[in-house]
Amino acid sequence: MTLLIEHVPSAQEGRLYSPAVLAALDLAPSLPAGCPYALVTAAAGAKPWAFPGLAQLARRIHRERAGEALQLRPVRVRFKDGPRDVVQVLCVDQVGGRERLIGYAWISGRDWTVLTAALDAGEASDGEWRGVA
């Protein structure tokens, strides 16, 4: 697993700046309370997309990937309330090996294979989204 961390204020910075300023400078994403599934996009400071179910999260990932191959990696990301295990979702160009980050999927701490199964269940053989209930 990889730990992704932005700038963490030093003790000196903590004394120099007010808590409101430090909170404003913190670019770590936050999840809405009680959010079972979310997609935190690659844009800095962007609000996460919240989803009530795993099928809706998988549908959003399929929409973002636009037919490209996906690669999923379990990683650990720092959120405002602390580090969490999430799934990094990447689009991979099969020919050139280039990667495009879609975002980080929060799946309530479940194993990343649960997201893989949901993505597989929603995709038909022709690549179109069929969805699951």
Image: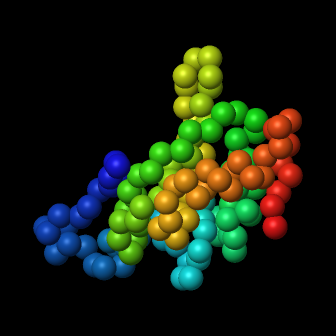
Identified at 38% across, 75% down, the residue is 81
Identified at 26% across, 61% down, the residue is 8
- Evaluate whether residue 27 shows in this view: no
Up/down of 20 relative to 55, above or below = below
Drawn side of residue 22 relative to residue 108, left or right? left
Choose between 27 and 126: the one closer to the eye.
Answer: 126
Up/down of 116 relative to 20, above or below = above
Kindly give the residue lying farthest to the left in the view shown. 12
Report the label total.
0
Identified at 66% across, 33% down, the residue is 69
Q: Position of residue 90 (x, y in %)?
A: 57, 40
Q: Where is residue 129 in the image (x, y as percent from the top left)?
A: 83, 48
Which quarter shows the C terminus? bottom right
- Evaluate whether residue 39 shows in this view: yes
Up/down of 25 relative to 62, above or below = below
Drawn side of residue 24 relative to residue 96, left or right? left
Choose between 34 and 44: the one closer to the eye.
Answer: 34
Drawn side of residue 112 relative to residue 117, left or right? left
Q: Position of residue 115 (x, y in %)?
A: 60, 56
Kindly give the residue lying farthest to the top in the view shown. 95
On the image, which quarter does residue 66 sit in? top right
Identified at 60% across, 65% down, the residue is 38
Q: Where is residue 3 in the image (x, y as percent from the top left)?
A: 32, 52
Drawn side of residue 9 relative to residue 54, left or right? left
